[in-house]
Amino acid sequence: MPTIAWPAGLAPVEDAKAYLLLNHGPTILISAAHGGQRNVMAAAWNTALDFSPAKVAVVIDKSTATRALVEASGCFAINVPCRAIADLSYTVGSISRRDVGDKFERCAIPHFGARAIDVPLVAGCVAWLECRVRPAPEIAHEYDLFFGEVLAAWADERIFRAGRWHFDDGPQELRTLHHTAGGQFFSPGEGLRASLLGASTAADSTPINKD
Ligand SMILES: Cc1cc2nc3c(=O)[nH]c(=O)nc-3n(C[C@H](O)[C@H](O)[C@H](O)COP(=O)(O)O)c2cc1C
């Protein structure tokens, strides 16, 4: 393994901005409902955790109204928005139910009912994951982190089919939204197909993700 000199052109990133280096995955909308109340918020801090049974993790801050609904109902839905609903996605992440009341009504959000949980799904998104909370109260308290077991998942076939995204040949407006900062988003660009490095490197290991 060659050691090289410290590369030119590296700039330090301040602590409060370090998360942004990892944070440009898809922004999602978390919807939840309980006791006649419903809500939806944006969340850029999210990740898949396991293949099957599928599990996910999302950060839901204590200040959000959504969190109370998730904690009370034990359920939430992940809605994966796209370019076509960028303004709506940013808006529901910038106003709170505490201040504006029912965001579905206020923002005239078209929605339909989830199948496995009693939660509204946001129409116009490109994928949806219906989740049951896997309780981890100490972690939720300390890190605002919630784990979800995926009970059902759906996707718009125009952009996700045969087990993968089709950003290259799908409609532009269905590309997912990735937040960089301050309301600026990007969408996936041109795809590329990677190859495994030479035989000597790959000989004694099997790639984990062969799809
Ligand atoms: C692009 C974007 C990403 C966000 N990501 C998160 C997140 O990961 N976790 C979180 O708790 N809040 C996040 N927020 C903030 C919430 O969406 C925001 O506080 C929202 O108003 C909460 O709504 P509620 O109080 O009605 O639940 C994000 C906001 C935006 C605009």
Image (cartoon, rainbow, N blue to C red):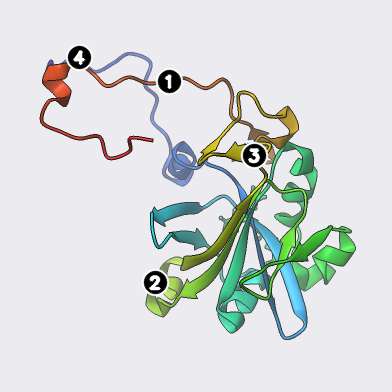
Q: How far apart are the two marked residues, 1 and 3, measured between alpha carbons?
A: 22 Å
Q: Amino acid at mark 1?
A: Arg
The residue nearer to you, when weighing 70 against 5, is 70
Residue designated by label 3: 177
First along the sequence among labels 4 and 2: 4
Where's residue 104, x and y in %?
82, 64
Q: Nearer the viewer, mark 1 or mark 3?
A: 1
In this figure, which residue is indicated by the disc labeled 4?
A: 5
Residue that carries the numbered disc 2 in the rendered image: 139
Q: Which residue is mark 1?
A: 193
Label 3 or label 4, whichever lies nearer to me, is 3
Q: Amino acid at mark 3?
A: Leu
Label 4 Cα neighbours within 10 Å, binned few <14 / some 14-19 / many ≥20: few
Provide the secondary structure element on which disc 1 rests: loop
Residue 196, percent from left and from top: 27, 21
Looking at marks 3 and 2 on the same chain, the residue that comes earlier in the sequence is marked by 2
